[in-house]
Image: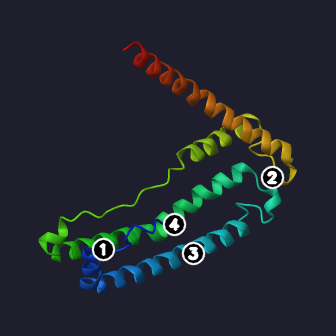
Amino acid sequence: MMNNDEILLDDKDKKFVRRHWRMLAVIAVFFSVAAIAGLYVLLWFIATAQVAGFIPAMLGQWTIGYVINFILHLIFWELLLVASWVIVIVAIIFTQWYNKLPEEERGSKSKRGKRDGSNAFSFLVGLTWLIVVWLDGNWNLALESWTLNTWVYSCLAALAWDLLIFGIPIALGIIWWIRKDSLE
């Protein structure tokens, strides 16, 4: 939700955009080309992986092992075929552009908006869920044979393990902090 009291672009930012609109247009076009290239690599990898038998064509036959293997290989191909040239070109263009900026524009720091919060805990629960699935022996079990109970209980087990591992030390720290303040 956007705060109506905050100005999206102040006068300094508007002046910067007016002065460097060509470079911003180049960045937008380059971002679009890189996104399209990434999409083509994704579609190519999906088709190739199915034809080669690397992944099953039917989603119900997928296992968590297939999902993780697919994601890791996709990241590899995206890095190799897209990110390798994108990073080099972005570094060259940005360095050339930055060196041409006036000194007063180089030192200005961009303001960043407040973040509503991170998703670190959700990410941690997701990783723990993968570990729970592996430990339960469901790693290579086709997803079509999973029951709703299997999925819900594995999610609750992951949440419980994270709360147990991190909740107890946090609770002890809070108790210690409250007790320390009450003694003073």
At label 4, which amino acid type do we have? Glu
Q: Quadrant of residue 12?
A: bottom left
The image's mark for residue 143 is 2
Viewer-proximal residue among 6 and 95: 6
Q: Residues within 10 Å of mark 4 (few under 14, many from 20)?
A: some
In whole angstroms, how far apart are the C-alphas of marks 2 and 3?
26 Å
Viewer-proximal residue among 158 and 12: 12
In whole angstroms, how far apart are the C-alphas of marks 1 and 3?
35 Å
Residue 149, horizontal then vertical, whole percent: 85, 43
Task: Please report the residue visible at 58 percent of the width from the left and 47 percent of the height from the top.
Answer: 123
In the image: residue 115, left or right of residue 56: left
Q: Is residue 23 above or below residue 110?
A: below
Residue 138, horizontal then vertical, whole percent: 78, 41
Mark found first going from the N terminus, 1 or 2? 1
Q: Is residue 65 above or below residue 85?
A: above
Choose mark 4 or mark 1, whichever is in front. Answer: 1
